Amino acid sequence: MTKRLLLIIFFLNAAALPLCSQQLVEGIVAIVGKEIILKSEIDQYIQSYIVQNRIDVKQNPQLVEELKNQTLEKLIEQKLLLAKADEDTLTVDDEMLDQRVEQRMRYLIEQVGSEDKLETVFGSPLKKIRKDTRKVVKEQLLVEQVRSMKFRNVKVSRREVEEFYKTYKDSLPSLEETINISHILMLVKPSEDAQTAAYNKASEILDKIKNGEDFSELAEKYSDDPASAKRGGDLGLISRGDFVKEFETAAFNLKDGEISDIVQSQFGFHIIKMIERRGEKIRTRHILIQTIPTQADEDRAVAKLSEIRQRILDGEDFSKLAVEFSGDENVHKDNGNIGEFETEKLAIPEFKTIAENMNPGDISEPFKTEFGYHIIRLEDRQKKRRLTLENDWRRIEEFTLNFKMEREYIKWIQEFRTSVPIEIRTSS
């Protein structure tokens, strides 16, 4: 079960990768109904798996042959499910497809460093890479739909859950240590002099753009947003609510090709260029010039947090003070509580370090992260433990359901294979 699950995870990840443009028409390995499977398609999946998992093929030469056979089987399954999707006239939501494609394109560009490098790696223009990606992602979404519709009514009884736990309890994963944290974030607001310096720099860049210099090149050279700067400031497709209000308002008011005046947000000063609109979504580039706080600005933030901490220790309500003072944009929804997380998977490493020596109810001294200064209160800590029916029924029920659905899927796909002609020509 473990090996199969690992391959399924690999296959679904790899399925989101576009195939190389040099894919040849010849080299057909199998025909499934009206669908063909190419040798180059299998090779692409295998290479992706090897790269993602950093496998040294020289140390394990037999693995490649094993992966060929396993990948062929999974591709046959995918083609069968696509035939079923066609039979059931299933469709894919265009908005979801656009979102998935954009996520995949961003990931690929970030991996290689720029759009130009991506075109070099795939030997195709960006438009062709996006088109290939769209086709593969669409197929993946259709396959997900087929499986979901087929097994949406599968249920498990109490007895099945108990039997599953009895059989597999030693193989089930342990629950790692978790902590529940609340915080108050104090943004470090730059002085007036710092804001003036940043605004003047943004003005100089805007003048360069107006004088005909390339927006993408200026973004790569000057923008303080490193992720988008590598892509010439490209932020990809965004929807309303994806960015802070000031940026969003200015961006959605632009026409195709239009460039904004200087826009100020909590992150600094932006210059925004509209690339295109797609329905209710927009694709933009931006150049960000951050305002750099002084040490005096940071000292003020720490002093204010220390004052708030003392008020809490003196009996004032943490949540109310969080709503009043915290710079976290979600504070009005969560009252400062950021939820329960596995300790080792906390996204902000400073939170993990500070919380390690805290007991429930403790409030930390002010500390710094990339977002500003914080104080945290440890609400709860749950030590690492094994799953039990008494405490973790829902989790074990979910494991049981997934196990049952996988068994049903294997049985169904084997039966399905008998109804569609499959010709395997070669596995080499």
Image (spheres, rainbow, N blue to C red):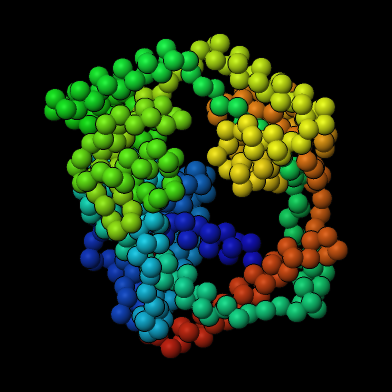
Of 248 and 156, which appears nearest the observer?
Answer: 248
Does 291 appear above or below 23? above
Q: Residue at x 46, y 73 (%)?
A: 145
Q: Residue 269 in the image: x percent, y percent?
A: 36, 27
- In percent of width and height, residue 143 lies at 44, 71
| Picture mark count | 0
Q: Nearer the viewer, residue 117 or 115?
A: 115
Instruction: Residue lying at the far left in this picture: please name it.
Output: 212
The x and y percentages for residue 276 are 24, 49
Image quadrant containing the C terminus: bottom left
Q: Residue at x 38, y 70 (%)?
A: 92
Left or right of 186 on screen, residue 77: left
Asked if 112 appears above or below 144 in the picture, the reply is above
State which quadrant residue 205 falls in. Answer: top left
User: Which residue is at the far right?
Assistant: 390
Is residue 229 in sight in this rendering?
no
Locate residue 133 relative to residue 393 in the image: left or right.
left
